[in-house]
Image: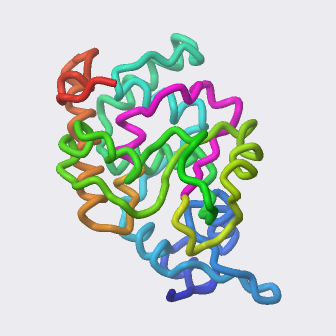
Amino acid sequence: MAEMTAADAAEHLQVSQRQVRRLASKGVLATTRVVGRTLLLDAASVHQLAGRVRHNGRPWTAATAWAALALLSGQNAPWMDSAALSRLRHRLRGARATEVAWLARGRARVHQMQGWGRDNGLIVTGVSALREPQLAALFDLSPAERGVDGYVAARHFDDVVTNLGLFDDIEGDVTVRVVPDDAGYTLDRPLIAAVAVDLSESLDTREAAAGERVLDDLLDAFRAGDSHTPGRLGVVW
């Protein structure tokens, strides 16, 4: 695995080292190890981030990010007030897939882990969600056998770690996305928009392209005023 120092990553991304460390703490950049006082990052995650289109404005809070993903998935976001929802709908109507993915990066804290369990206790997303045939067809991707990818509420994280025998491992094949308890979203079902965003951030170029394409389709349907977006795209959950 190629590594990059925080200083080199900052230069590559044209941000401060402090911002690099913040991105690493949120799981946006993958940390491989710390040697003395030097933070080493997975170079692939740095190059991936550099390849995305960065946008002005603060990232959304977790609550706003999940409201956006819910709306794009044809769901309601009852944890948001009407004025905030109106502003969010306006923003989504003028947004592109890359912008939504960038703004929604605070939706969860990402842990790369290893363990003996599968995905019990996780709301599947990314490659794990492709085991659903309709979803695999929507993204035009074959179900992936590798790894596990899923969301869990912060209050249940410790239980999932215990039940699945998980431990942090930068090269592990279990991706656990921990959603803050104040995010509003109840994690009772997968959201198509979340699956699309997660795939769009994949290091696999085909998965990333498929995620971005479906997210753009969801945005087009939202702009068209289709309140049954998933059904319009041929997937009903």
Residue 121 horizontal/vertical position (percent): 60, 39
Left or right placement of residue 160 versus residue 91 in this view: right
What quarter of the picture does the C terminus occupy? top left
User: Which residue sits furthest front?
Assistant: 116
Question: Which of the 4 image quarters holds residue 47?
Answer: bottom left
Q: Which residue is drawn at 62% across and 65% down?
A: 114
Q: Which residue is drawn at 31% across and 45% down?
A: 97
Question: Which of the 4 image quarters holds residue 159?
Answer: top right
Image height of 195 relative to 228, above or below: below
Residue closer to the observer: 107 or 167: 167
- What colour scheme governs how the chains and residues are painted in the rendered image of this protein? rainbow
Residue 76 horizontal/vertical position (percent): 45, 16
Q: Is residue 118 at all visible to an observer of this figure?
A: yes
Question: Which of the 4 image quarters holds residue 187?
Answer: top right
Numbered circles on residues, count? 0
Q: Give the range drawn in magenta.
A: 175-197
Residue closer to the observer: 139 or 105: 139
Left or right placement of residue 93 versus residue 37 in this view: left
User: Which residue sits furthest right?
Assistant: 36
Q: Residue at x 24, y 58 (%)?
A: 209
Image height of 5 relative to 50, above or below: below
Residue 184 horizontal/vertical position (percent): 61, 25
Left or right placement of residue 184 versus residue 188 in this view: right
Residue 193 horizontal/vertical position (percent): 37, 37
